[in-house]
Image (cartoon, coloured by chain):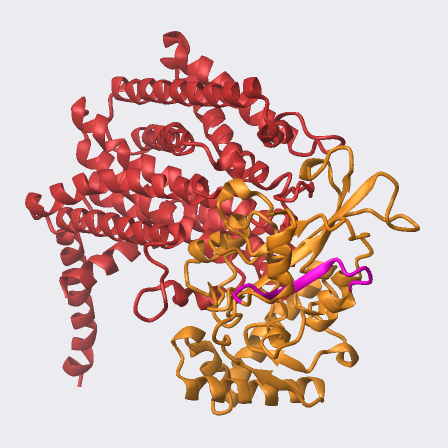
Chain colours: A orange, B red
Amino acid sequence: MKNENSRRSFLKNIALASFATLALSGCDMKALEEFLQQNFRTLSKKEKNKIIKNLAIDYKKKYGKEFNVSDKPALEGTLFGYALDLARCVGCRRCVYACVKENNQSREPQVHWIDVLQMEKEKGIDFAHSTSQYNPEKVPSEGHFYLPVACQQCSNPQCTTVCPVKATWQEPDGIVVVDYNWCIGCRYCMAACPYGARHFNWGEPTIPVEEINTEMHYLGNRPRMKGVVEKCTFCIQRVREGKYPSCVEICPVGARKFGNLLDPESEIRYILENKRVLVLKQELNTQPKFYYFFGI
Amino acid sequence: MNFIRFIRGSVKIMLHGSNVYYAWLIFLLLLILWGGFGYYDQLRDGLIRTHMRDSVSWAFYIGNFTFLVGVAAAAIMLVIPAYIYNWKPIKEIVIFGELLAVCAVIMCISFIVVDIGNPVRFWHMLPIVGTMNFPSSMLSWDFFVLSIYLLINLFVVTYLLYCIFYKKEYNKSIVLPLVLFSIPMAVAIHTVTAFLYNALPARIFWNSALLAPRFLASAFCSGPAILLILFQILRKTTKFEIKDEAIWRIAELMVYAMFIYLFFSVAELFKEFYSGTEHILYWQYLLFGIGDNHEIVVYSWSSIIMGFIAFVLFLFPQTRKNFITLNIGTVLIYASVYVEKGIALIIPGFTPDVLGQIYVYTPSMTEIRTAAMIFSAGFLLFTLLSKVAIAIIFEDYNIDILNKKARKSNREAVSEFDHPFISP
């Protein structure tokens, strides 16, 4: 029965589509323009301005709100780094949901940029014996500690090397970004990432209108489309304006630290110089700019 | 102009055949339709229609792609022994091998297209109009070598058939270098495909130098298997002549390939299980399952058992030279390699995932239907092209026949026109 329906709707859609192309061939210039849009990195300033202006108009039409879409480039003299205090993290997952809201991730199907793993204290950092599906009444659970993982913003990223179309790259401030309009959705980067930091829009992403974040960056939290890859950008729309990423702000125990690695006075530099830090999967030579440490 | 007549003549052959031929075409068309509606669902709703998720982000489609690269490669590599052992119908072996290679490469590219999230953006991968990440990305290499391989084979096979059709002598100085060049290209497409997986340090299961050699060895099992069946069918139904000895020789070569494959696999397993590091997890998931997750075990063991029976059947001359047991072995080895490439190679690369989590993957109905669509379309293409090749090579279908018919129908047309002018 369901098959029958899909078949009928298929034929109907074909008829509709061909009718629509005939009737709207004049107005469909915009779709064509979007289809022909080039890789973001090869665009001129003028072209970029036009694109982000159009995006703001499109979003307003779709969501009925005023949007501010930015394409602000990296600031001179910045290289962002992150540190996470494993001794403090209690595994509450507030960061996960703050991130979803800030970065306009799809709610259905769910996309999370941060995965929090529950590990056994006896085993130490051991992925094979960890679980991301923990669900106790209260965290932290006895005998466990928590290891949140998002993009490690590698200095030597595998994901950008393997991309067949150069749709993902490392910005001068160290943030690895994706051009959602250029990504073909082959998911080679997901196979290459050793941290499971890349996420794919398997279905049409949905964001509730009342929860949408209107402060956007072209390479960051603007709404994605079906069939493209997305990832943590250190909240590019915030950090390039001098704010903290939203996961840093929400963390109730202050486990998350963020700053400019090139600034000798920054908190992140203090941690690197005074605490014993580690990076995940050091042997793979990805050289993450995301450090873990034990603060207490 | 000549070429258009050749194409027209070819289409004419494709459209005429026995009832069995029509029934086969209709069967394939129905399968394409059934699969096509499945693929339409995926186009509408996205890849969420598959059972792939972030943990297992590549699966059945990419496995099929890998398998077909092997078929495409092995079809041509069979030219080497044909040449060395001086099997009589070398030209025919080259032509059918290349036809198979052309169809297999087209199927390969189709599997990539259905696997990507935005198929209309495929042009981003092209040089000049897009931004091809060459030479960094192995995927761009793969696309590059596959395209060249497709073009070479398409050209050579069309040119050869064209010459036979026009009863011309073909130009050896064009064909021979291209055929010789296509042999290392066949090795290249398979090696590059293996490197696609091989050089990802994140995926420990694939990060073994034996991956590419194992690929080639298994391709030498599955590719000739198809040709073995095809040659027997051709021998029965057309004037195609291939001696029993040549068929047994192919089977013998397949035994060597199977043995090498077995040896490589044992070497790999020994290293993994004897050293017993945490890297063993992926093999453990493949062969025994982890915890309650055994879903993939049935695939891996069915592949191993089928492969092993085929090996035994091919190993002993009594069963190798008996056409019943030979054909059973051929089907078994084909199925074994298909399951191995389709599931057993890809899935353990992603399970457990890079963060140690287990997501159990088995193909969804949409994936199976889409694969059925591509396979039947590939078979359809191969049937049509083979029909033309058979007619031109074995049934003396050539330009003279076409001319004779044309003259005849012209005469009829003229005589019909004549009457109205005469009668008044």
**Residue depicted at 44% across the width and 39% down the height:** B198
* Percent position of residue B362, x then y: 65, 42
Q: Quadrant of residue A252?
A: bottom right
**Is residue A261 shown left or right of residue B380?**
right
Decide if residue A200 is in sight here.
Answer: no
Which residue is more in the foreground, A260 or A183? Answer: A260
Q: Quadrant of the C terminus of chain B?
A: bottom left
**Is residue B254 shown left or right of residue A174?**
left
Which residue is more in the foreground, A159 or B249? Answer: A159
In this picture, is A188 found above or below B411?
A: above
Which residue is more in the foreground, B153 or B277? Answer: B277
* Percent position of residue A175, x then y: 53, 65
**Is residue B203 shown left or right of residue A138?**
left
Decide if residue B156 is in sight here.
Answer: yes
**Residue depicted at 35% across the width and 43% down the height:** B192
**The residue stretch that appears in magenta:** A251-262
In this picture, is B265 found above or below B10?
A: above
In this picture, is B279 found above or below A272?
A: above
In this picture, is B92 found above or below A24?
A: above
* Percent position of residue B307, x then y: 49, 22
Residue A256 lies in the magenta stretch? yes
Q: Quadrant of the N terminus of chain B?
A: bottom left
**Is residue B284 shown left or right of residue B150?**
right
**Residue depicted at 52% across the width and 79% down the height:** A18
* Percent position of residue B324, x then y: 44, 18
Residue B393 lies in the magenta stretch? no
